[in-house]
Image: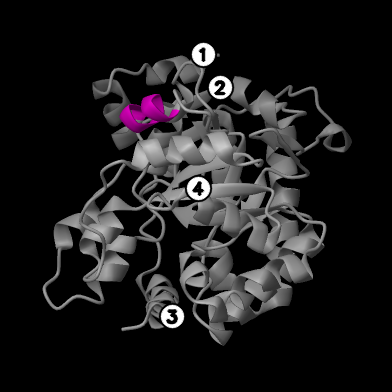
Amino acid sequence: MTRAQRKRDHIKYALSTGQSRRTGFDDIEFVHQSLPDTSLAEVSIQTKIGGLSLSSPIFINAMTGGGGKDTERINGQLAVAAREAGVAMAVGSQMSALKNPEERQSFIIVRKLYKEGIIFANLGSEATVEQAEAAVHMIEADALQIHLNVIQELTMPEGDRSFKGALERIERIAERLPVPVFVKETGFGLGREAAEKLAKLPVAAMDVSGFGGTNFAAVENKRRANKLDYFSHWGIPTAAAIIECAAVDGGPDVIASGGLQHSLDAAKSLALGAAAAGMAGTFLKVLMDEGPEALRDELFAVHNDLKLIMCAVGARRVTDLRQAPLIIKGETFHRLHVRGYEPAAFSQR
């Protein structure tokens, strides 16, 4: 099977497997504020991640590319929606375009259609410094995402089986590149152990990409004759991953992603300690089911709803959400407690 066909399969199976809604966000509640002392007109959703200033904490996270005309069309439509809503956008892994120049256009289309936008390049942790530089140059990227996908690779029939030296490669890339480097998971969640290692590197942000959204083990199991079903239930739920990463002293900025479905999920993510919130599967489904205009409208609606939620809890700025009291209950409470955190502290801040 060609790499391009695999990319097209990923889109098809990502849509068919859907999202499990096991992110932990349903265990998080804002404490109602009857006297928030705010005005909707005062609310600003500007934020910063890794030294980049964003007009919104919501961005279109990495999805695709390298699958020929099909993924070129999708990336083009995503770029137009991002441009009209004024949000950042990440592309999928560019390794395919580095190995096959014919696939470059499926990535270049993003910068062509979104000339002034903030765009993140994307490569796996197997990349060299030279490949990272080429990926950034290809789309004139403002940052580079380095994705970690151990479970996907192990489930993928033709995937990698060695992950040695990844931390050293990430460090070399982060030291050499002229743009910020973000490290992101791919749907299985960054935990404290990984975050503490990344905090020692010149990494600008870490994207938790937690369990509960698009499940790439389930996607790859669709492509296997003998299923590895245990990996389909493997990972750190997104809400818990945000807390674990945000609690690391001196760590990089935290980006929330992994099964975020609406503005309330985004607001909870920001209140738990994230500086931005990426959405992929939800936006892809809207695009494929309803078209590019519906995606643009969805982005505007998410922004509007986020502002309403912030006004309701008395948050004039994104960073103010980190002071909003939260109730953490259920499985997420138990998980955090046994991991050594104090979930009750979120309710008393």
Q: Name the residue under label 3.
A: 4
Please tell me which of labels 4 and 3 falls first in the chain.
3
**Dot 1: few (<14), some (14–19), or many (≥20) neighbours within 10 Å?**
few
**Label 3 sits on what residue type?**
Ala
Q: Residue at point 25% right, 60% down?
A: 160
The front one of 24 and 52 is: 52
Left or right placement of residue 277 versus residue 15 in this view: right
**Label 2 sits on what residue type?**
Pro
Please tell me which of labels 1 and 3 falls first in the chain.
3
Residue 285 in the image, given as x and y percentages of width and height: 53, 71
> What is the spatial separation of the Cα atoms under label 1 and label 2, in whole angstroms?
6 Å
Between marks 2 and 4 in the image, the one whose residue lies nearer the viewer? 4
**Dot 3: few (<14), some (14–19), or many (≥20) neighbours within 10 Å?**
many
> What is the spatial separation of the Cα atoms under label 4 and label 1, in whole angstroms?
45 Å
- When asked about the image quadrant of residue 104, the answer is bottom right
Residue 144 in the image, given as x and y percentages of width and height: 58, 48
Q: Are marks 1 and 3 in contact (CB under 8 Å)?
A: no
**Label 4 sits on what residue type?**
Val
* In the image, residue 110 lies in the stretch drawn in magenta: no
> If the image is split into quadrants, where does the C terminus sit?
top right
**Label 1 sits on what residue type?**
Gln
Asked whether residue 55 appears in the rendered view, the answer is yes
Kindly state the secondary structure of the residue where label 4 is placed. helix
The front one of 116 and 15 is: 116
Please tell me which of labels 2 and 4 falls first in the chain.
4
Q: Name the residue under label 2.
A: 325
Q: Do the residues labelled 1 and 2 touch (CB within 8 Å)?
A: yes
Please state the extent of the stretch shown in magenta in the rendering: 192-198
> What is the spatial separation of the Cα atoms under label 2 and label 4, in whole angstroms?
43 Å
Badge number at residue 348: 1
